[in-house]
Image (cartoon, rainbow, N blue to C red):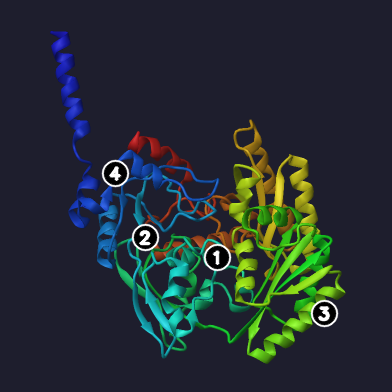
Amino acid sequence: MTGLLSRAAGRVAGRRRSRPDPLVADLVAALGPDRVQADAAARYLASRDASIFSEGTAGPVCFPASTEQVQACMRIAARHHRAVVPRGAGTGLSGGAAPLGSPVVLSMTGMNSVLEVDLDNRVAWVQPGLVNLELSRRVAAHGLHFAPDPSSQQACTIGGNVANNSGGPHCLAYGVTSAHVAAVEVVLSDGEVVVLGGLEAEPGGYDLRGAFIGSEGLCGIATAVAVRLTPNPPAVKTMLAAYPDAASAAATVGAVIADGMVPAAIELMDARAVAVIEEFARAGYPRDAGAVLLIEVDGMDGGAAIQADRVVAIASANGAASVRVAADEAERARLWKGRKNAFGAVANLEPDYYLHDTVVPRSKLAEVIEAVGEIADRHGVSVINVFHAGDGNLHPILAYDSRIEGMTERVAAAGEEIIEVSLAAGGALSGEHGIGVEKRDHMDKMFSPADLDHQNRLRQAFDPHCRMNPGKVLPSPHSCADIASLKAADGALWG
């Protein structure tokens, strides 16, 4: 009899386990079965981004096709008291898209259309899943492009660029994403749709558009973005200057800006970066250089030529062993191919890497680069410096092999010291990658308790119930989310 009762209880428990989750059932009813995935494989794939700080587990993963479907997801999640995390291409490097507490994950990659292009006003309405570079390709025939150009622009999406206020090499002259977004259609945590900003020259009221851009998914989900399009410059001059050391290259950066020029881009790569890039991309960088600068100026034909001559003179005066001006578009493309493929090239050096992101004053570049090298050496980690030197946005690449016991911990420790050095130099935690979970617990090193409290109040004005991407950016106790309980919820909800 005991065995019969045990088998019967097992069958009842099995039926209970096989019952569809009410949350999943409601999502399927709203979106259709082909737009909701709740199996372990789908949730695992949605649980990470490109950072080494991904943690947590996704709940059901939804693939909405419209603003109305995003609204439906938000209302269903609210009804079931579940958080929501928006996700783009997953190229983020701060853990911002890694779900905490098994939330509903909204993958926005299917909403990837160009909705409207207004050539007269040089504005395009696009969906958030549109790939950054694809937008420029779509408007290239009209002599226009989208200026923000992250190194991941072949894969990253406009929605992700908005979430992190992304930059890129050419943002030195043209500005980061916020300078190129006029308005954003947003679904709030309760399902309400609002438009922040506008196409007028001076939209009325507070700049809620500016507050939303860079909020890393904490304030709502963008479902349409009005982006400003930039005319392609009539003339472009691209130069590669080779130096015996990184300090001389860094001095040139300050000298060019002090001369009154703001080039379109100034990128610095150290000796190890040059070596791995050349091995990988054959970009034409001098292998014997201690560092190189990739400098680009643009404008009208005469003006660009004059600026290029001035840059060559300044580079030579600051110790450049050689300065080469790209002879044609093919050579220019090769030079940029090297820079854009730097992170992929690191795979030839080590199987893993941590791409850091801090900002320091241009006057402290040489000092901080030296300190970064010392930190890496002390921790036994290889470092490759490739970064936006023009605006002081450092991107040290810490290359390592995670299979070596203790190596990941050494890399994390080196990364924390780089943060300390950058802040001590008068810098900032992040230039374009965002805070996410990577730098969440370092926020109090840059902001006072009052600063953090007001940031949380702003976040709660958009999302009073703390349903949007909880556990990111703001540390406890300034976050409205209890980070420890979110981590515990991962196992409790999904096993």
Q: Mark 4, mark 2: which one is toward the viewer?
A: 2
Spatial CA span between label 4 and label 3: 61 Å
Kindly state the secondary structure of the residue where label 3 is placed: helix
Count of labels in the image: 4
For label 4, the residue is 38
Q: Foreground: 4 or 38?
A: 38
Q: Neighbour class for label 3 at 10 Å: few (<14), some, many (≥20)? A: some
First in sequence, mark 4 or 3: give its number.
4
Q: Mark 3, mark 2: which one is toward the viewer?
A: 3
Q: Is residue 408 visible?
A: yes
Kindly state the secondary structure of the residue where label 4 is placed: loop
Residue 109 numbered tag? 2
List x then y, in percent, for residue 272: 73, 52
First in sequence, mark 3 or 2: give its number.
2
Spatial CA span between label 3 and label 2: 46 Å
Kindly state the secondary structure of the residue where label 2 is placed: loop
First in sequence, mark 1 or 4: give its number.
4
Amino acid type of disc 3?
Ala
Residue 150 numbered tag? 1
Amino acid type of disc 1?
Pro
Q: Foreground: 439 or 78?
A: 439
Q: Is residue 205 visible?
A: no
In the picture, measured across the screen, residue 23 lies left or right of residue 435, that is left
- Dividing the picture into quadrants, the one containing residue 119 is bottom left
In the picture, measured across the screen, residue 353 lies left or right of residue 162, that is right
- Dividing the picture into quadrants, the one containing residue 148 is bottom right
For label 3, the residue is 313
Residue at 64% of width from left, 32% of height from top?
A: 404
Q: Neighbour class for label 4 at 10 Å: few (<14), some, many (≥20)? A: some
- Quadrant, the C terminus: top left
- Dividing the picture into quadrants, the one containing residue 247 is bottom right
